[in-house]
Amino acid sequence: MSHREIHAALDGHLKAMEGLPPVAWENVAFRPPMDGSAYLRTDFMPNSSDYGSLGDIGTVHEKGLYQVGVSAPSGEGSGGAEALADRIISHFTRKTLGALRTTLPYRGQARPGEGRMFIAVTVPYQLERFT
C-alpha cells in the first residue's frame, strides 16, 4: 500500500462518517461555509518506517499521522467543537482499513483564531507490509 493509497483510505473513512460537516481536503479548493458554521480540515503526515523483523525477507512498518482539524465559530463555547472532535475520535478508534490500522486517536487543546476556534484530532496509523 503506497502513501497515496494510505491517504485515500483515511480520507475515505472520514467521508463515511455520519453527519460530516464540510471538509477542506488537502490541495482541493475550499470555501469555508458562509454562515460561519463548523468545518473540518485534513492533513496527511507520513512519518517513519522501521523493520518489524530482520533478514532479507520480513516486515516493514509504515507509520504516520492523519490529522483532522475542527474549525468552529468562537464565542459560542467549545461544546459543539469538542463533541465533533469526540465523534471523529470514536469514528477512527481501532479501525482496520485493509492492511492499515489506526490506534487511539487523541485531541489537542482548543486554540483560538480570528473569529474561530480550532481543535486538532490526531489519528496515528500503522501499516505492516511484507518485503
Image (cartoon, rainbow, N blue to C red):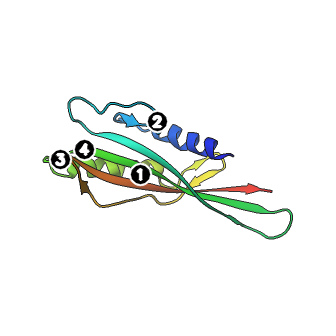
Q: Secondary structure at mark 3?
A: loop
Residue 126: x %, y % from top left: 60, 57
Q: Secondary structure at mark 1?
A: helix
The residue wearing badge 1 is 90
| Point 85% across, 62% down: residue | 57
Q: Earlier in the sequence, mark 1 or mark 4?
A: 4
Closest to the observer: 32 or 14? 32
Q: Amino acid at mark 4?
A: Ala
| Visible residue check, residue 16 | no
Q: Amino acid at mark 1?
A: Ser
Say few, some or many: other residues with alpha carbon within 10 Å of mark 3 (under 14 / 14 to 19 / 20 or more).
some
Q: Are marks 4 and 3 in contact (CB under 8 Å)?
A: yes
Compute the Cα span from label 1 to label 2. 14 Å
| Point 59% across, 50% down: residue | 96
Compute the Cα span from label 1 to label 3. 24 Å
Say few, some or many: other residues with alpha carbon within 10 Å of mark 2 (under 14 / 14 to 19 / 20 or more).
some
Residue found at the very far bottom of the displayed protein: 54
